[in-house]
Amino acid sequence: MTRILMVAGESSGDRYGAHLIRALQDRTGDLTCFGIGGEQMVAAGFEPLHDSRDFSVVGFVEILSRLPMFFRAMRDLRRAAEERRPDLGILIDYPGFNLRLAPHLKAFGIPILYFVSPQVWAWRKGRIRTLARCVDTLAVILPFEEEIYRAEGMEVEFVGHPLIDLAVPTCSRREARDRLGLRKEAPIVGLLPGSRPGECRRILPVLLEAGKILREKIPGVQFLLPVAESLDRRVVEEMVRKKNLQVTLVEGGYYDALNACDVAAIASGTATLEAALLGIPMVIVYRVNPLTYWLTRRLVTVDMAGLANLVLGRRVVTELIQGDCRPGAVAEELRSYLENADRRNRIRADLVRVRQRLGEGGSFQKTAALAMGLLSRKRPVASPAAAEMKR
């Protein structure tokens, strides 16, 4: 039996992990995967030692209250690695935790595949040293990452972005609007406040206030809010009710709902890339705890936050971050998109290039092939440091 310890720290990692597990099962039927994951990984046959939903937190300040949980999870994974001796460790994104776990796995002689690598090109470049020391193979999902890691002498492969395979609506834009009961003649604005509860609490009120301003400027405008699985719909409904804005909340059929939108205001993250792949002009927004933002700005080495902008190497869609993330500014950008057809068309043409740069698809199959390659190698002997690392 092949035993794999897998760690995916939040909802996107859970989703990617589930697809990767199935790709691995296609290659080896006798497979056991355990570690940190969520509902989607469990549905694929994963054994969770901790639930990835508990790890869905962003920011230095925000993490402090969760430290006891992180310490327990680290201890449990180290014990599981020692007792069950997995044949391979697969770490998916979530570098703050995974790069602390990697040395322990390495000390036990467990080869490591890192899927969705840390964004060292954006901040905390020193993490490359940990990756080079502990990780056997990197499966990167952004085209420019391969050269960065190869220059450090690492074994790396650009497997393409998972969203090329996943961000696919099941129906046309017109059909999506019909199914959602939306008026065809009035513009539709998507409001996406992020998939983490903390993000939603900070960002959704701004988007709802922006919606109220926009409603005064463009009578009849419609608002659509796809509710992420990680959010409590009742909490979202209450926030919408307090702002007195008519919003259509949608659960399930995420890509169909997103595809129904003319434009969108989206919290920085994976959702911005999903919108880019669907050709939707967007305003990228974000807010964090002020102290977290102050600390982050001293570590970040790029001047853009949006993944679509980063992939293209220039600011194609508007970014309104922290102090710039104000209802009036968000509403004004959305209004400009809706009233300026030439601008919308230019942005859509640019977003086509995002898809072209993200690979041909098949990232899960390619990553599974890398995993099988590591499994076929002679397993290294645990170093003498293992006894110390496992304490």
Image (spheres, rainbow, N blue to C red):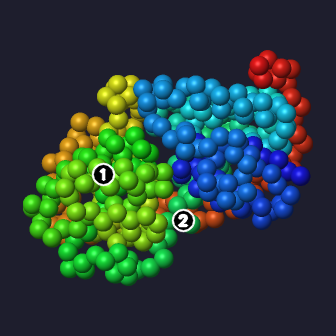
Residue nearer the viewer, 275 or 142: 275
Q: Is residue 114 above or below residue 214?
A: above
Mark whose residue sits in front, 1 or 2 = 1
Helix, strand or loop status at disc 2: helix
Q: Is residue 127 above or below residue 24?
A: above
**Residue kind at label 2, given as amino acid type:** Leu
Quadrant of the frame with the C terminus: top right
Q: Viewed as shown, does residue 295 lie left or right of 240?
A: right
The x, y position of residue 300, in whole percent, is 41, 32
Q: Is residue 166 above or below residue 391?
A: below
Choose top left, top right, bottom left or bottom right for residue 153: top right
Mark nearer the N terminus (1 vs 2): 2
Is residue 366 visible to us here?
Answer: no
Is residue 171 visible to us here?
Answer: yes
Picture residue at 27% right of the left edge, 54% below the top: 240
Picture residue at 43% right of the left edge, 30% below the top: 62
Q: Viewed as shown, does residue 48 lie left or right of 68?
A: right
Q: Could you give the CA–CA distance between mark 1 and mark 2, rounded to whole angstroms?
A: 31 Å
Residue with the mark numbered 1: 238
Q: Viewed as shown, does residue 29 lie left or right of 246?
A: right
The x, y position of residue 327, in whole percent, is 19, 47
Choose top left, top right, bottom left or bottom right for residue 19: bottom right
